[in-house]
Image (cartoon, grey):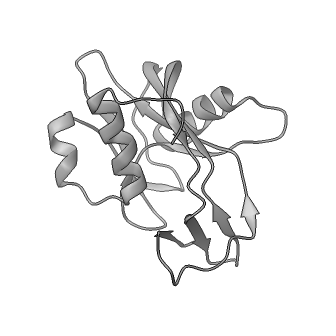
Amino acid sequence: MGRRDYEDDPNAPVANSLVPAASVVVVDDVGRVLLQRRRDNGMWALPGGGMRIGESLPDCAVRETKEETGMDVEVVGIVGTYTNPRHVFAYDDGEVRQEFSVCFLARPLAGRLAVSDESTDVRWFEPGKIDELPMVPSIRKRLNDWRSGDTPALR
């Protein structure tokens, strides 16, 4: 399913859905960050996705990271909350989702990098190399917030 991101775009479609979601900045012991190349838009992104009934948001972060990258992780902090009502995701099936995401900080525990049905590539990147990668502004903001240490609770 394709997805298009709209942020502060007056031509964006109106949201018809709100789904709690988690994204995850996974940092290994040498300071590299884990990113996946999304199948739906071709952009590099953090692992993450929508929360399921019966799970906590940190559990969602762990599950989504495993599903999308092959890595088992432990949540160790929060980068920030991202709830911009002017940021929506339009999906091919007609859903237009308003952003509602908590971005967690995690460390890898085990696993082997693996692509999924949602990704075409999964890699570790030196923080200085991520500026060159194509990604949507909201993901770049999370990564910049993590790198700068600017992690107030509300966004």
Which residue occupies the foreground of this view, 18 or 51? 18
> Residue 13: horizontal and vertical position, in percent?
61, 80
Please tell me which residue is depicted at 71% across the width and 42% down the height of the picture. 51
Residue 54: % across, % down: 84, 33
| 142 sits to left or right of 89 | left
Q: Which quadrant would the N terminus be assigned to in this image? A: bottom right
User: 41 left or right of 95?
Assistant: left
Residue 40 drawn above or below residue 20 = below
Residue 36 visible at all: no
Q: Quadrant of residue 12?
A: bottom right
Q: Residue at x 46, y 25 (%)?
A: 105
Location of residue 88 with respect to 115 vertically, above or below: below
Count the marks: 0
Toward which corner of the image does residue 138 lie, by quadrant? bottom left
Q: Is residue 66 visible?
A: yes
Name the outermost residue toward the bottom: 11
Relative horizontal placement of residue 146, taking residue 17 as reference (left or right)? left
Image spot of residue 155 (x, y percent):
51, 42
> In the rendered view, would you say 62 is above or below 109?
below
Residue 148 placed where, x, y %? 27, 31
